[in-house]
Image (cartoon, helix red, strand yellow):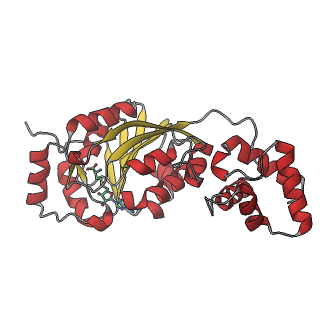
């Protein structure tokens, strides 16, 4: 009876057998705690109706647990040295496909259509490579795919940004970009001792689930995100100063900006971190109405 891949003794044996030298540049920290993997599978509520996309299977620790609960698992691994390792470690499972690709270059919609035909619910479950957490998340939430859930491990500080409330230090453009599409919650935190090798940071599992529809939508998403990015460009400056940096300081513009804030009852002197997503959307639309 072979122990699970995540069993620390087995993980080390696999690394020795295949001479795996961990690549820090690819964010390779392998999970070697079966309890934590069980908790991830539980947080993602994986059933045999679910098709799961995994980013960065590594040596297959999480992939194996996903395959036991899911209908199919589609995993993207950039490191081609790990592909033959995965072929061996995941040999007992017939519902896994591993693709040697950079997740940032993959068209996820096309991959689902061609590799997961007939998919009902698609979930993303991964222990992310931390150096590209933000671009991976931005790619996933902006893809034209309705994921049933995205359940991912990341650095604890980034997890706090995703789930932040207005008025806190962690709240910012990333929070709003993610919360525009999904509801974000920290499921649990994970100590660095759960990995081989141990990373220099603590980690957390975040669950992103489809959010309730917003009462009001921006007249274009591009305008909303331009406003959000601009308002957080200089976090410590007032909303008023940031708005002038985005839209200019011509007298007519300043008048229209002031009128827009007055329409919404927003104080010019506050910082952007005080505004909720709903207020950013309302401001986008009122600015548009005032031709800013
Ligand atoms: N899933 C494994 C586990 O939990 O033990 C490994 C997780 S490790 C934190 C991150 C994995 O992502 C590594 O296997 C790394 O090679 C892979 N990776 C890094 N950059 C990637 C990219 N751009 N596209 C796909 N995989 C990538």
Pick the front one: 158 or 209: 158
Residue 40: image x %, image y %? 33, 37
Q: Is residue 219 visible?
A: no
Q: Residue at x 38, y 47 (%)?
A: 156
Quadrant of ligand 1 in image: bottom left
Question: In screen coordinates, is 39 left or right of 291?
Answer: left
Would residue 266 appear left or right of 82 to someone viewing this image?
right
Q: Is residue 280 in view? A: yes
Q: Residue at x 42, y 39 (%)?
A: 51
Residue at (89, 52) in percent of width and height = 259
Where is residue 146 drawn, in percent x and y?
56, 42
Report the residue that reaches farthest toward the right.
252
Residue 66, position in %: x, y?
Answer: 31, 39
Q: How many discs mark residues in the rendered view?
A: 0
Of residues 45 and 291, the one nearer the viewer is 291
Quadrant of the image for the C terminus? bottom right
Relative vertical location of residue 23 with respect to residue 75 in this rendering, above or below: below
Q: Quadrant of the N terminus?
A: top left
What is the x, y in percent for residue 260? 85, 51
Is 65 placed left or right of 186 in the picture?
left
Residue at the extreme front = 269
In the picture, measured across the screen, residue 102 lies left or right of residue 278, that is left
Q: Residue at x 31, y 48 (%)?
A: 202
């Amino acid at each position: 009876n072979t122990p699970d891949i995540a069993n620390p003794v087995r993980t080390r044996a696999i690394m020795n057998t295949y001479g795996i030298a961990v690549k820090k540049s690819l964010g390779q920290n392998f999970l070697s705690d079966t309890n934590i993997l069980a908790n991830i599978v539980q947080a993602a509520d994986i059933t045999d109706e679910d098709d799961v996309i995994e980013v960065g299977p590594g040596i297959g620790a999480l992939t194996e647990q996903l395959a036991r609960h899911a209908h199919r698992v589609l995993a993207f691994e950039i490191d081609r040295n790990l592909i033959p390792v995965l072929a061996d470690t995941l040999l007992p499972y017939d519902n896994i496909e591993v693709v040697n690709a950079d997740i940032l270059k993959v068209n996820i919609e096309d991959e689902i259509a061609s590799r997961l035909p007939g998919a009902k619910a698609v979930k993303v479950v991964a222990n992310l490579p931390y150096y590209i957490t933000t671009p991976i998340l931005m790619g996933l939430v902006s893809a034209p795919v309705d994921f049933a859930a995205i359940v991912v491990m990341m650095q604890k500080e980034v997890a706090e940004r995703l789930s932040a409330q207005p008025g806190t230090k962690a709240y910012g453009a990333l929070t709003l970009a993610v919360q525009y599409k999904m509801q974000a919650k920290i499921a649990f935190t994970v100590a660095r001792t759960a990995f081989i090798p141990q990373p220099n940071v603590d980690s957390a599992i975040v669950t992103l689930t489809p959010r309730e529809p917003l009462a009001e939508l921006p007249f274009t998403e591009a305008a909303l995100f331009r406003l959000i990015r601009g308002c957080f460009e200089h976090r410590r400056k007032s909303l008023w100063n940031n708005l002038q940096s985005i839209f200019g300081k011509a007298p007519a513009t300043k008048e229209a900006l002031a009128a827009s804030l007055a329409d919404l009852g927003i104080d010019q002197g506050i910082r952007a971190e005080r505004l909720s997503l709903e207020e950013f959307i309302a401001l986008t639309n009122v600015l548009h109405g005032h031709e800013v």
